[in-house]
Image (tube, rainbow, N blue to C red):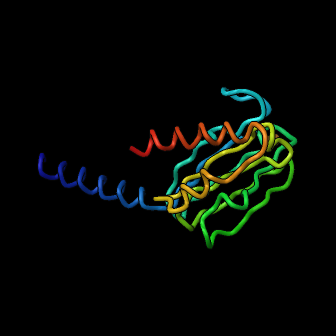
């Protein structure tokens, strides 16, 4: 009895490991008001693996999600969502990706998606962003550095 239980447990563990290797999808809400203030992506720092996706959810109207030229790795495809609509983006190329809500970019409605081990971290950090996006990204890169340890 004991041995068969161990075998079943080992089998379940193997399934869990296989399941973990499958592509994941992370939900990010676009909100008028979030825990960290007005006009936010929530969460605004996402760490995923190559092949995973982010589903940007139009929880509130008037927002979109778009990539930022200069804040994505070489070879990655830019994306632009439509206002007030969900968009799902699959990230295949490892790197740091800046994401903006186009109407609220300068108001700091941005997010940082880090895929695998980023090779463009310094370039993404150095990229100049407008208004409140600058401080927001500085904070997000700091949070990422702390979480990456
Ligand atoms: Cu917005």
Quadrant into which the C terminus falls: top left
Name the quarter showing ligand 1. top right
- The image shows a total of numbered marks equal to 0
Whether residue 103 is situated above or below residue 97 in the rendered picture: above
Provide residue 98's location: percent of width, then percent of height: 66, 52
Provide residue 8's location: percent of width, then percent of height: 24, 53
Q: Residue furthest bottom?
A: 75
- In-image side of 39 versus 113 (left or right): right
Provide residue 108's location: percent of width, then percent of height: 75, 38
Whether residue 92 is situated above or below residue 35 in the rendered picture: below
- In-image side of 110 versus 126 (left or right): right
Q: Nearer the viewer, residue 110 or 142?
A: 142
> Residue 18's image quarter?
bottom left
Provide residue 7's location: percent of width, then percent of height: 19, 55
**Residue at screen point 77% across, 39% down:** 59
**Residue at screen point 53% across, 39% down:** 142
**Residue at screen point 42% across, 61% down:** 21
- In-image side of 123 versus 79 (left or right): left
């Amino acid at each position: 009895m004991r041995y068969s239980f161990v075998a079943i447990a080992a089998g379940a563990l193997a399934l869990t490991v296989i399941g973990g290797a499958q592509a994941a999808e992370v939900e990010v809400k676009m909100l008028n008001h979030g825990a960290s203030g007005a006009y936010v992506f929530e969460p605004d720092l996402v760490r995923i693996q190559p092949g995973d996706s982010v589903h940007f959810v139009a929880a509130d109207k008037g927002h979109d999600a778009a990539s930022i030229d200069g804040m994505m790795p070489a070879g990655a495809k830019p994306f632009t969502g439509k206002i007030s609509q969900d968009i799902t983006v699959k990230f295949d190329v490892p790197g740091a990706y800046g994401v903006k809500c186009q109407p609220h970019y300068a108001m700091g409605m941005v997010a940082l998606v880090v895929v695998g081990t980023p090779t463009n971290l310094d370039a993404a950090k150095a990229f100049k962003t407008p208004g409140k996006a600058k401080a927001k990204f500085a904070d997000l890169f700091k949070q990422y550095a702390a979480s990456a340890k």
